[in-house]
Amino acid sequence: MIQVYTGNGKGKTTAAWGLALRAVGQGLKVAVVQFLKPPTSGERLAAARLYPELSAFGETRPYNPNIDQRNSAELKADSRSNFDLARSLVLTANWDMLVLDEINMVLHYDFVSRTEMLELLDLARDKIEVICTGRYAPDWLLDVADLVTEMISIKHPSEHGTSARKGIEY
């Protein structure tokens, strides 16, 4: 099945990693490709320590709040490379689950085309559970998904000036 976690609320990546850990606990082979996040994200570091059989991939340059992500040639190149990696993981068919963390933002920024993403999902359908996370999931992705969850922010400490906290937000 294809699952999508989207919306402006917190918890999209956490939900996907929770599914990944549950799957590993049940003996499934899981790969995670992270987009637009550095390899030092807390969930990725924890997975490497606790669940070495859960493979996390994808390289992204460190986040720079002073650049416009949509117009960053470096982030586009990283996203393209990570998407090509995700496609190769699907083609190997060695996985039971593939988490595409922040792929929705990559699609929103047009770093990967609708056609390319639909082709990847067609390749995966009936073979690999695909989990897509990130804000701004396009309507066409919601239409092809089997499960869609929207995280809604009701209240967040950042609205009152609290900075992102290590181990909580990243």
Image: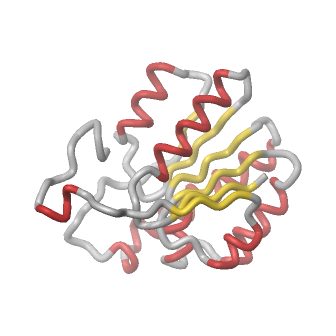
Q: Position of residue 96 (x, y in %)?
A: 76, 37
- Residue at the extreme left: 161
Q: Does 125 sit above or below residue 107?
A: above
Q: Does 66 sit above or below residue 151?
A: below
What colour scheme has been applied to the protein in the rendered image?
secondary structure
Q: Position of residue 60 (x, y in %)?
A: 41, 54
- Residue at the extreme right: 126
Quadrant (top left, top right, bottom left, bottom right) of the C terminus: top left
The residue shown at (44%, 20%) is 49
The residue shown at (35%, 72%) is 69
Q: Position of residue 165 (x, y in %)?
A: 21, 44
Q: Does 90 sit above or below residue 49?
A: below
Left or right: residue 11 compared with residue 163: right
The residue shown at (37%, 63%) is 153
Q: Position of residue 44 (x, y in %)?
A: 44, 36
The residue shown at (59%, 53%) is 100
Q: Quadrant of residue 155?
A: bottom left
Residue closer to the observer: 106 or 13: 13
Left or right: residue 35 compared with residue 130: left
Left or right: residue 114 compared with residue 56: right
Count of picture labels:
0
Left or right: residue 112 compared with residue 73: right
